[in-house]
Amino acid sequence: AFVNNPAKEQELNEADENITSEEEEYGCEDDRKRQKLLEAISALGGKRKKRLGERSEAAVQMSEFTVNAEGEGDKIDLSDLIGTMDKTPAISAKTKNRLRKLQKSKKTIECPLSKQETERIQRDVAFQKAATEVSRWDGIIKQNQRAEQLVFPVNQEPSGPKPMERVVTSWKAQTPLEQEIFALLSANKQPITDPILTPTETASLKAMSLEEAKIRRAELQKARALQSYYEAKARRERKIKSKKYHKVHNKDKRKVFLKQFDEMVKTDPAAALEELNKMELARMQERMSLKHQNSGKWAKSKAVMAKYDEGARKAMQQQLEVNKELTQKLITSLNNEEEEEGVDVEVMPDFVNDAEQGLDSSNPWMRGKLSEDHTEKEISDIVDLSAEGAGVAENTAEEEEDTEKVEETEEEALLREFDSRRKLRQAQEADVVPSAAEELDASDKEAEELTEFTSLFRGIAEQAEAAADASPSDTKTQLDEGLMRIKTLEDVELLSQEESAPEIASVQPQPSPATENLPHATQQGGKNRKRKRGIELKEVLTKETKVIQVPLAPTVEDKEDSDENLDQRGLIKEAFAGDDVISDFLRDKRKQEDAGKPKVVDLTLPGWGEWGGMGLKVSRNKRRRFRIKTAPPPPRKDERLPSVIISERKNSSISLHQVNSLPFPFENHSQFESIICSPVGRTWNTERTVKRVTKPKVVTRLGAIIEPMAREELMRDKNHGSAGNAK
Amino acid sequence: MKVKVLSRNPDDYVRETKLDIQRVPRNYDPTLHPFEVTREYTRALNATKLERVFAKPFLASLDGHRDGVNCMAKHTKSLSTLLSGSCDGEVKVWNLTKHECVRTLQAHEGFVRGMVVRYCGASFFTVGDDKTIKQWKMEAMGYGEEEVPLNTILGKTVFTGLDHHQKDGVFATCGQQVDIWDEQRSSPIRSFTWGVDSFSCVRFNPVETELLGSCASDRSIVLYDMRESMPLKKVIMTMRSNTLCWNPMEAYYFTCSNEDYNLYTYDMRYLQRPVTVHMDHVSAVLDVDYSPTGKEFVSASFDKTVRIFLKDGGHSREVYHTKRMQHVICVKWSADSKYIMSGSDEMNIRLWKANAAEKLGVLAPRERQAANYSQKLKEKFQHHPQIRRIARHRHLPKNIYHQTKELRIMKEARSRKERNVRKHSKPGTIPVVSEKEKHVVTVVQ
């Protein structure tokens, strides 16, 4: 700012000095007075600036160069400079104009910010800069916090002596000239170390000759053409809407396939086996899915239409066919044809579901899984009865085994059968409960508990067994599945027939449904004499049920022969024949139950309110009044569980070791429990898992200096990040 | 008749060479190995007990100083070298493996206030009460040679702290102001002041190497950027911070030791409230140093204990003390993260293990696996009361124990009073102030 307040004052001052110099001759007295007056006036204005005192020394006033030191100590004004401007010709008119304009404008420049404020702004800006700079580390810090394992020092170089070869090869004398040459060579893809061939040269060497290339090209062309033809054909065929065509087509295909397969069996058994495996896989997948079960929307709609529409019926039938084919067990016995025949036999053209299809040539009844067969058989019997009207015709149809010519009745029978089957299941389930209840009423309590107990025990054992040898055959698992579904009564029956028989004499073998069904079965056997062997099998089955009521000794022997698991159990049983663990357990349980029962508190005091003394009884009224019965406790949790004692009392010695509140990082109990329940030791885990699980979080090396994080890490992280993104 | 005979395939149990490990056939069927939780719990309990049995952290005491140890410095390149400066101006260089003093030099008159080894490890700097900065050669002088500093800078005021840049020939001192010095020049290339006349500590950020932090006597912590002409920001706390240490792995975290018995970890971008308040000491905390892994730090206190904190743990995981150890003035964590050095008033430097129960030396693979496994078990069952009780049990000197108790009672009383006041006043008039916010007075830009 050229123009401001102190300047004005100085102008005044200056003017005043001019006067003094002019009037010097007249007298100093007036001058001084005036000066003082002026000073006083200016002091009134509150300006504190110290003025230069009047100078009287000659040296200052009159310079030795005879230049008047007028205006000394004042600031130079812009106008002072511009005054000489007009006289100098070197200055252009343009600048003159601009300067004049500048002189005229009276705008003052804004006052600068105070020092404190500027500093503050500077600090703020600097801090923002530093903060953003530091924030670059966010990614790495987060990553390190989340890392499962951190190994320090961060970028390790293997310590110790390096092999000589590496040291020698890595070392190269490089002068600037050499460097330049190498840079040029590498830029032009010229060989550096072994100057024989450039990469392009080697590539050309590797290329094939012209004739070869031509032949190859022709081959490729041909292949491509063939492929396109084939594709076109397939597309055309796929577009054909005729179902008949597809049916025929598929059948053809199947025939061809079968032929091929037969040939394959003879020529290449391994490939055939593979094919078989494939089929087996498809079957298994089918079994897992609900396809072709006539249970989908489509099937339901067809079922409605089936009464009137032959096409629909046929379609359903066909689907059932497919289902049957897929669900049947295929036995891969290329060696013995007999078994193959057996398989064929087993392929029942019946509409019986998986469970029965799963029947195996190895005899299931010998494994004591009888009751399940019972049910199945029972069901099928009833079904047969219900479908009796259609029976004979059906049988003949089945004998013919030609699905396309199946009679109409069959489908109806089919559907009805599905229905009735379902109903039967439901009815059975409903029946089971009351009958069981009756039985419970009839037999005494202990016996019942015992049976339940043993049945449970057996169930568990069998489960384990099933788990143990789940892989070898599908049939076993299937059977076991069935067993799982069986309700308690069946369990009891099974048990009474098998295991509990030697143990408890009191439990008599139930009049099993098998025996009841026997007449049906035989009857049926008579009727369907000409049925296929699948049905014959059933006959055998019913016969066998009779056999089962015979004491168990022979079966046990069989078991011993067949599998060693059972054998071992038998052994254990034999070893512990003396001690009756089960009844001990039951006694224990009974004791616990009794202890938990509420006791009657007798608060009667003799002599209060009536006569007391020897031989006097407390009156009944009083007794009734003062004997306090506490409310019965809530039912025990193990009331219905015969094989378990659940104690609800808190055990203080255990609670000492228990966690009583959910620890911090966990959100619910199950999380925490799952962590605690998964063992980490090598007793339960493989070596590799143990190593992975017990990996320490921070690994440091003994005697290695860990440097602080370097900036290079940031760059490396960025590169990694970009690479990761690219992937 | 079929006769069953035990037969085994030798391939299952015979080694190919005798150098192979023995094949042990294992059956992982869970039914064969029941009670896994209880068994592991027992193992964890035993491991915890053993850990306490083997927890013997004290390794050695280095004596030789004739006055209290006021500062220490780690050698940047050698793990076995430690430098210490005492209150009588003496500097000693120690060989930690041999537990002996290698070299002694009278560096200053009066206290040796600060000490730092140059990043190359060839020389070190000291500042003292005699207003000088001296640079010394790391190698000992030859026989008969006099101990002469390489370089001496005479300052105008007393220097109280010193730190060296991570990679450049630049160092920082503090006293009346924070100065940045070039090693080649005898006057500071930059000085920062901000209305404070006394600083107690200045530290370079080891990651973002141009940043600095300092503790001032007006209860503030001030941040600087070496490249700027102004300080960046300062936070004023309720009590004075004595020292500060940056996390060597996480650029923006630093921890300061405070006179109010606590340590505070700050994120330098958000100074309004500390990230964590570390409590446990019962007297002023005098020094703090981070583990080079950046996961833990160690603090030295006037209450005669050394404590180790997890970087995000509110309470210490370990407390070290001995009968003879007086006020601990300085503490360092060794560069391989295995040891802790503490220098105290009673002229001794003590060497501790960073993990009290850790076995030192080379571990056999099986030993290491076992250690890892037991560590994992302890971690897994750490919430169980018995294990927690054992793992957390530490012996404390009587007075510290009682002081802790007293402090707890005082704290409870205060919080109770606050609660009562809040209960009896108009809702919303007395806000709930978290522990973290309590100790920050203001942030100045």
Image (cartoon, rainbow, N blue to C red):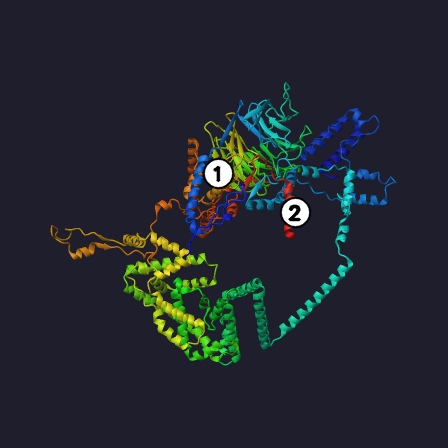
Quadrant the N terminus of chain B occupies: bottom left
In this rendering, the answer to whether A249 lies above or below A41 is below
Badge 1 crowding class, 10 Å Cα cut-off, few under 14, some 14 to 19, many 20 or more, is some
Left/right placement of residue B120 relative to residue A34 reads left
Q: Are marks 1 and 2 on the same chain?
A: no
Quadrant the C terminus of chain B occupies: top right
Q: Circle 1 — which element? A: strand
Residue positioned most to the front: B1
Residue A425 seen in render: no
Chain of the residue displaying label 1: B
Of tags 1 and 2, which is closer to the observer?
2
Q: Position of residue A399 (x, y in %)?
A: 47, 76
Q: Circle 2 — which element? A: helix
Badge 2 crowding class, 10 Å Cα cut-off, few under 14, some 14 to 19, many 20 or more, is few
What is the count of numbered marks? 2
**Which label is found at residue B317?**
1
Amino acid type of the residue tagged 2 in the rendering: Asn
- The residue beneath circle 2 is A719
Pick whichever, A548 or A383, lies toward us. Answer: A548
Left/right placement of residue A320 relative to residue A168 reads left
How far is the residue under mark 1 from the one under mark 2? 37 Å
**Which label is found at residue A574?**
none
Amino acid type of the residue tagged 1 in the rendering: Arg
Residue positioned most to the left: A614
Q: Position of residue A403 (x, y in %)?
A: 51, 76
